[in-house]
Image (cartoon, rainbow, N blue to C red):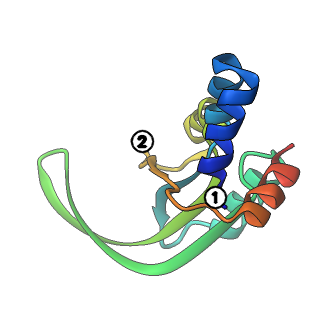
Amino acid sequence: MTLSLVYGVLAVTLGSDWIRVLRKMKPIVVLTTLPATHDAASFSQKLVKAKLAACVNVLPGVESHYEWQGELVTDTEKVLFIKTRADKLTQLKEFFDDVHPYEVPELVVLPILAEDVPYVHWLNQVLG
């Protein structure tokens, strides 16, 4: 059984106000990038300690191509996969504004379409 099915059952049982609360608590993955030289471990640990992420995966050595201030740029970066919940996005954005090294940090939010109930339970325990 997926959590999406659980949401449907709870909507019928508890009403629409509860389902709105539960949807805000929906697990998501947030992608961001850091410069290759940045301490991704420290950045990730701060996210976990602040209860903004249950887990952060760091993928090093990614080659990125983009336009910045009218110039074509090629950089080596690290990609972070941040496992969190939708209700943490405002705090996560504030964290990025305060701590992220980029002037315009990437914050791409991906929904988790198929959820494993034990994993979601663990994620919710970690995030509080």
* Residue where numbered disc 1 is placed: 2
Badge 1 marks a residue whose secondary structure is: loop
Q: Which mark is residue 103?
A: 2
Tally the marks: 2
Badge 2 marks a residue whose secondary structure is: loop
Residue 34: x and y in percent read 49, 62
- Spatial CA distance of label 1 from label 2 is 38 Å
Residue at 73% of width from left, 57% of height from top?
120
Mark 1 or mark 2: which comes first in sequence? 1
Q: Residue 2, relative to residue 40: is it above or below?
A: above
**Which residue is most to the bottom?**
61
Residue 15: x and y in percent read 69, 20
Q: Residues within 10 Å of mark 2 (few under 14, many from 20)?
A: few
Viewer-proximal residue among 28 and 118: 118
Viewer-proximal residue among 45 and 102: 45
- Let me know if residue 87 appears in the view: no
Residue 91 sits in quarter: top right
Q: Residue 14, relative to residue 82: is it above or below?
A: above
Q: Which mark is residue 77?
A: none
Horizontal arrangement in the rendering, residue 112 relative to residue 88 (left or right): left
Residue at 71% of width from left, 34% of height from top?
10
Q: Amino acid at mark 1?
A: Thr
Please state, as top left, top right, bottom left or bottom right, where the N terminus lies in the image: bottom right
Q: Residue 60, relative to residue 100: is it above or below?
A: below
Q: Amino acid at mark 2?
A: Glu
Q: Residues within 10 Å of mark 1 (few under 14, many from 20)?
A: few
Viewer-proximal residue among 15 and 120: 15
Residue 128: x and y in percent read 87, 43
Residue 115: x and y in percent read 61, 61
Q: Residue 77, relative to residue 91: is it above or below?
A: below
Residue at 60% of width from left, 58% of height from top?
82
Viewer-proximal residue among 32 and 100: 32
